[in-house]
Image: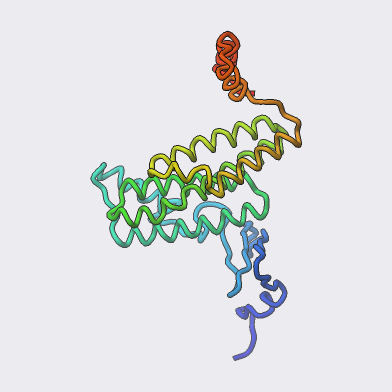
């Protein structure tokens, strides 16, 4: 067989795979649209930048989640995913994971947040309508990982503003939400040792020290209560409750 345009050898030779490295680029497709490419050991993955990463529109909807949500809306709370739809949910989780990793590598943090939100919404939906608790738990175990990416990206968006105080607030809020997830799954005893929790705390310390930030209102309030300085605590609580008060 003669080598023609369909041969991938020249493309793969030009963009070598490097073990242990995440290799991502954004290029223009043949029609001028922007696409993402990820180099993996067996070739190249190409992902769309909007909608589903594979570009498919299930039954005309932007994603399989949107399509399934429309079905559930029609059938009500009794709706349950069948085996075929469970398989499609698995595929969509996997696709959005790959694109989220691409966005992180390219430092496209708003896109990281958007794709993480989609994954978490799909996780909520699949758990609520799962035909098998073990199947939904298979996805739920990755919730802290997805949340970590979203919290990290939100903090980095704030730092680019630059608004380091907002970055700290994003991390603190994210840590509270992570703690709730651990508590929901009766795993609170693992929260303090969790790798993602510790990475976020390290990020918080790094931002605080680099930008020479003082204690937040939440921290000042905790210190005032511990010192039984209730007059100061009341003042700090009032400041904290005002719009935009957590600074």
Q: Position of residue 218 (x, y in %)?
A: 58, 24
Q: Position of residue 135 (x, y in %)?
A: 34, 57
Q: Nearer the viewer, residue 180 or 74?
A: 180
Residue 82 visible in rendering: yes
Q: Give the residue at the far top of this rendering.
A: 231
Q: Nearer the viewer, residue 57 or 167?
A: 167
Going by the image, does 180 lie left or right of 206? left
Quadrant of image for the C terminus: top right
Which quadrant of the figure contains the N terminus?
bottom right
Visible residue check, residue 245: no
The residue shown at (67%, 58%) is 26
* Towards the viewer: 161 or 26: 161
Q: Is residue 64 above or below residue 187?
A: below
Instruction: Determine whether, in the image, residue 244 is placed left or right of residue 180.
Output: right
What residue is drawn where x is 46% and y is 51%? 62
Q: Position of residue 222 (x, y in %)?
A: 57, 22
């Amino acid at each position: 067989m003669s080598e023609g345009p369909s041969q991938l050898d020249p493309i793969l030779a030009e963009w070598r795979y490097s073990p242990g490295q995440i290799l991502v680029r954004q290029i223009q497709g043949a029609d001028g649209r922007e696409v993402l490419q990820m180099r993996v050991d067996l070739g190249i993955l190409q992902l769309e930048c909007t909608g589903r990463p594979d570009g498919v529109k299930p039954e005309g909807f932007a994603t399989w989640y949107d399509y399934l949500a429309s079905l559930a809306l029609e059938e009500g709370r009794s709706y349950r995913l069948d085996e075929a739809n469970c398989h499609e949910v698995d595929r969509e989780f996997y696709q959005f994971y790959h694109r989220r990793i691409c966005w992180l590598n390219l430092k496209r943090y708003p896109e990281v947040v958007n794709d993480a939100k989609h994954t978490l919404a799909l996780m909520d939906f699949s758990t609520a309508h799962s035909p098998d608790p073990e199947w939904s738990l298979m996805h739920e175990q990755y919730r802290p990982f997805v949340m970590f990416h979203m919290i990290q990206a939100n903090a980095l968006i704030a730092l680019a503003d630059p608004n380091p105080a907002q970055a700290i607030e994003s991390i603190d809020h994210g840590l509270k939400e992570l703690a709730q997830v651990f508590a929901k799954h009766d795993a609170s005893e693992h929260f303090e040792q969790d790798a993602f929790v510790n990475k976020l705390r390290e990020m918080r310390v790094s931002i605080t020290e680099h930008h020479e930030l003082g204690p937040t209102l939440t921290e000042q309030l905790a210190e005032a209560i511990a010192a039984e300085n209730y007059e100061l605590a009341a003042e700090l609580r009032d400041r904290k409750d005002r719009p935009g008060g957590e600074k």
